[in-house]
Image (cartoon, grey):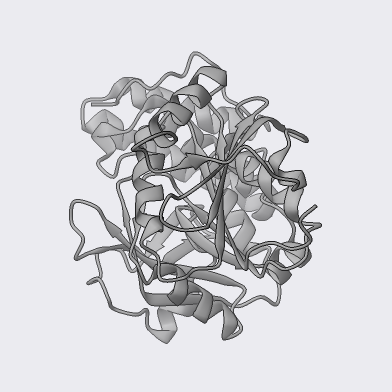
Amino acid sequence: MATDRAKLAVLIVSYCNPDDVDRCLKSLVHSDWKDFEVFVCENGGKEAFERLMAVVAGPERTLRQVHSGSDLLDQARGRLAAVEKCRFPSRTNIVRLGLAVDNLGYGGGVNAWLEQFLESPGWDAVLVLNPDTEVDSRCLSELMAKAAAGFGMVGATLVFDHVPDKIINYGLHWSPTTGRVVAVGRNAPAGSAPSHEQMSEIDAISGACVLVTRDFVEEVGLMTEDYFLYMEDLDWGRRRDKHLIGFAERAIVRHIGGTAIGSAVDPRKRSYLSVYLSARNSIVYARREAGWRWGLHFAFGLLYATRYVAMGAPTAAKITIRGLIDGALGKTGKPDASLRLHVVG
């Protein structure tokens, strides 16, 4: 049985988007950081897992299957119903593809792997990475260097895939007054670093690309899962206590965004599911963290819903209100199956 892990574990949660995972894996192949393993959690069920395997593993594919191994992580256990062990043809890094027992949501998909190798010695950090991202060859090295400088949660230069010269955000800030999550540094030029004032505003790093150290995970804990999707990254960051947030401006990550759930930057292209979860979880989080002010957050959410009416999307406004109400009622976890990926516009 293996007694230690690679220094860095890269965790990717997939949901029926194998082409995204394949593109992300292809970018990791070119990383100048050598000591890492990849763990993918497919949340979309058995058929999605089979499609993922067909796309990424096999002759002339990104991965080759490895049929031998004595590591416990090669076995289906915990919340993983199946595990396939692979590696990159051109390098020795191991990639494990896991099938979740159910759709565990984003935090649950991360935790399904993370809870399994917490007991393994040797690893120093975890990089949670969205499948619809591509990392620059220096990205992992830059992130690890920042972590080694004493930062427990580290962000990269996350840029728009279609506008790579502009930053999506340096990090996230939660307003205790309105309950809105603000993208700090949005549209700043790529390669720029946040000012001291901006860094002081950042509560968390976006879950699209966030590196956390072993100490962070052991002391802060796993991601909170009952949001299902959205707010778990903010929650993780605001629980960080003594752990410092850092930013690696030379770690470049291209992010498409919303390929699995339809959470596009343009509000007219967002799915109903994305609209609902954003509204619901904003209130769920506010009820936990804002005290009596969560009622104000609810009111701001109602005002926010009018934006959809103004753009001619009254159904999306209704779904926003439904989400706000469900959040006020304390509903969490997997949303109702009736909320499909219909697009607002």
The percent coordinates of residue 305 (x first, y second) are 37, 34
In the rendered view, would you say 71 is above or below 280? below
Query: At 60% across and 63% down in the image, what residue appears?
Result: 237
Image side of residue 302 versus residue 27, left or right: right
Residue 159 seen in the current view:
yes
Query: Which residue in the rendered view is the most extreme toward the top?
Result: 338
In the picture, the quarter occupied by the C terminus is top left
Q: x, y (%) of residue 174? A: 51, 60
Question: 339 above or below 7?
Answer: above
Q: Residue 179: where, in percent of width, then height?
A: 51, 52
In the image, taking residue 78 as reference, residue 85 lies left or right, namely left
- Residue toward you, 296 or 275: 275
Q: Camera-side residue: 105 or 143?
A: 143
Q: Nearer the viewer, residue 41 or 52?
A: 52
Q: Is residue 274 above or below residue 112?
A: above
> What's the residue at 74%, 53% (across, down)?
117
Q: Position of residue 72 (x, y in %)?
A: 77, 45
Relative to 203, 30 lies left or right: left
The residue at 29%/32% (across/down) is 308
The number of discs equals 0
Q: Quadrant of residue 60?
A: top left
| Residue 174 seen in render | no
Residue 140 falls in image quadrant: bottom left
Residue name at image x 51 percent, y 80 percent? 146
